[in-house]
Amino acid sequence: MTKNTFTSVVDESSSSGKVQIVYDDIKKTLGIDFIPNMYKAMALNPDYLELTWNRVQSIMTKEGKLDKQTKDIIALTVSIMSGSRYCIDVYNETARNEGLDDEAITEIYAIIDIYSGLNRFNIAQQTQKDEKPWYGCGG
Amino acid sequence: MTKNTFTSVVDESSSSGKVQIVYDDIKKTLGIDFIPNMYKAMALNPDYLELTWNRVQSIMTKEGKLDKQTKDIIALTVSIMSGSRYCIDVYNETARNEGLDDEAITEIYAIIDIYSGLNRFNIAQQTQKDEKPWYGCGG
Amino acid sequence: MTKNTFTSVVDESSSSGKVQIVYDDIKKTLGIDFIPNMYKAMALNPDYLELTWNRVQSIMTKEGKLDKQTKDIIALTVSIMSGSRYCIDVYNETARNEGLDDEAITEIYAIIDIYSGLNRFNIAQQTQKDEKPWYGCGG
Amino acid sequence: MTKNTFTSVVDESSSSGKVQIVYDDIKKTLGIDFIPNMYKAMALNPDYLELTWNRVQSIMTKEGKLDKQTKDIIALTVSIMSGSRYCIDVYNETARNEGLDDEAITEIYAIIDIYSGLNRFNIAQQTQKDEKPWYGCGG
Amino acid sequence: MTKNTFTSVVDESSSSGKVQIVYDDIKKTLGIDFIPNMYKAMALNPDYLELTWNRVQSIMTKEGKLDKQTKDIIALTVSIMSGSRYCIDVYNETARNEGLDDEAITEIYAIIDIYSGLNRFNIAQQTQKDEKPWYGCGG
Amino acid sequence: MTKNTFTSVVDESSSSGKVQIVYDDIKKTLGIDFIPNMYKAMALNPDYLELTWNRVQSIMTKEGKLDKQTKDIIALTVSIMSGSRYCIDVYNETARNEGLDDEAITEIYAIIDIYSGLNRFNIAQQTQKDEKPWYGCGG
């Protein structure tokens, strides 16, 4: 048997109560006809599933200060820095679905490359704060 | 003596040749009247300083696919994920200078919190790719 | 040829001296009839193998302050945070062998998700220590 | 002015509505008479504060599969692996408040030392899964 | 279709201008008759490809303070700490090509194991600087 | 009271038995007249102190395949990638004591900068192995 996650998961056919309600909301909100492996794995603890889903929705879907594309680019960047292949895959698909093409994706990766390097240089040097502020790459 | 970096640095008064040219370009491009500690530390290897500065400029300042604010938000996110205090400080200042207020900054941090957690959950589960694509938080 | 590790390994049939002694101790202590790939790779440097094995045993097997299950949960948590698939696999098997079921494992993963997120939020904010102590989630 | 976080925070005196309700719940649940800097920073986005607090409570305080001390040890381990000084401080205090003494804390740190090393060795080797399962340090 | 990278790549047959010049330099400098996947992916942004390649060459190939083998060992160590399987593969091949045998590679991995552990212990303890300097492992 | 580590430590004046023996060996081997904070913190668990010290000595001090300076450069690189300020300080002192000057240190940092960036780019791209081997930066 191939397993999609370490723990067993709650399939839609066997979901009930709180899990079923969240599953229905996931499919409706995301416009899909299946439950992603990640959420199926969370459903072993229905409160964890519900509270995680609601929190994600509140920050990512509800109107806030940042536009949707910027939010998805932050999620992609965090995924690349954290290194979960599953999340990198999902947010790569998401970025393309948002309209970002290969050139834009390459630009995101180039920025991640550059600042991963510069951060490590400054950790090495334990660089102290400058006496006056400056603004990254100016204006 | 308090040191701003582990290695000694090349102060403006003693810069010459390639270093002086880059220093002048840094001040002009960033609209500041000093050289940040990070670049002063790089100047011990003038080629490294020049090639790093040009590469940063090419990706961050030159017109590309993403707007300037989005690029700076990616740089801030990478800095928070990498953990260099110096870079976090610089890009926090940069984000504010770009017009992002406390609510917008908190939104960025909330997204970083959420996806740092979800990535780790999926690393724990070694979650396998879903058979059909889905797009993060829909919408 | 499929390789199990980058370097060649010391198979049981060709082990001798110090390596053979440690191999015998590994099989006896762990109650298995093979040498795990990790230890076979270390055996290229017999002192490294012996000193690593003895150190692991001293902390993990010898009676200490924490019970065996708690120690294994810490090892699983460190493996998930470090990201070695090999170690995640081994400690997932270990946790189940210790009697932890899918619900318990999900609880561990949920805590890891939550605190990976909160740590990152506080790195972003460079949050300063509170003037008075407080105790996580009380109780 | 010394700032405790990068963003401004919502002090108790100026809290209202949802924030005030959560603040009261935090003080009551944790048995403290102040709001930790972390939660004050989150309050700039009241939904984020509320949803994060409820999720933390649900996993950490509600009766689950693991006892309270084990949960706190996982939170401490994640904090050390993530590297937020604020969280390390809070969970160090928590562990001591739970009754763990210096010897027990040292044992936790020793396990973290050992498995941080072994994980990195196996990432270096890209060690493949053994054909048969084995259980960490046996016993 | 199997993809070697997330984004599409610029194959040699369709390269032109700046990309073609860098591609020719890569093949000549590295003594190979193909373009590695990493550089093909960068070529979607020709400036990024050129500036990255030149910077890598300047530090790694140009005569500096450290000998070539030491530089390659640093690159291997960074790759293992960062966790990109692609880079670990390339620098493992490089180390062997430099003349390092299985025993030498195991020694590198042992040092990485030891210091990954000790660093984490000192992050846990937030160990303060000693009043007098000392030099690692003496000698 | 300022604490040098989270846990209390075993001062030389109160050391005895196994701890005293290791303390004497540390001072003699490293040529110093004090016990570094790191080892004093480990001494709360005498077996952990002894086994860690012996393992470090075996890999770092005993004649092996790599020369002493290369070993120390690997330890410095791991420390910078792991981010313990204590270890970065110790290995920075060590590198200078080994005869590395500011230019050489800057070269190490430049390599760490470059490969931290490239690793992250390849994690983003999930770059697949090339069909033929290549050797980093040729030469």
Image: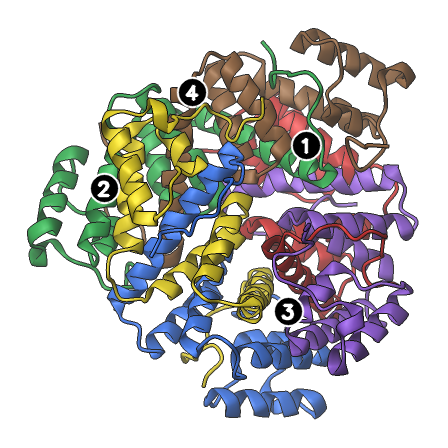
Chain colours: A blue, B yellow, C red, D purple, E green, F brown
- Which residue type carries mark 4? Asp
Mark 3 and mark 1, same subunit?
A: no
Q: Secondary structure at mark 1?
A: helix
Spatial separation of the CA atoms under disc 1 and disc 2: 43 Å
Write down the chain letter for disc 1.
Answer: C
* Image coords of residue B91 (percent x, y): 47, 53
- Above or below residue A62? Residue F90 is above
| Distance in Å between CA atoms under marks 4 and 1 | 39 Å
CB contact under 8 Å: marks 4 and 1: no
Residue under circle 2? E53
Query: What whole-number distance in Å separates the C-alpha atoms at marks 2 and 4?
Result: 25 Å
Q: Position of residue A118 (x, y in %)?
A: 42, 43
Amino acid type shown at disc 2 = Trp
- The residue identified by callout 3 is A7
Find numbered disc 2 in the image and state the secondary structure of the residue it sits on. helix
Dots 2, 4 in contact, CB < 8 A: no
Q: Which residue is mark 1?
A: C53
Amino acid at the residue labelled 3: Thr
3D distance between C-alphas at marks 3 and 1 = 30 Å
Q: CA distance from mark 3 to mark 4?
A: 51 Å
A15 vs E65: above or below? below
Residue D69 vs residue F40, the one in the foreground: F40
Mark 4 crowd level (few <14, some 14–19, many ≥20, 10 Å Cα): some
The reply to whether dot 3 and dot 1 touch (C-beta < 8 Å) is no
Q: Which residue is mark 4?
A: F102
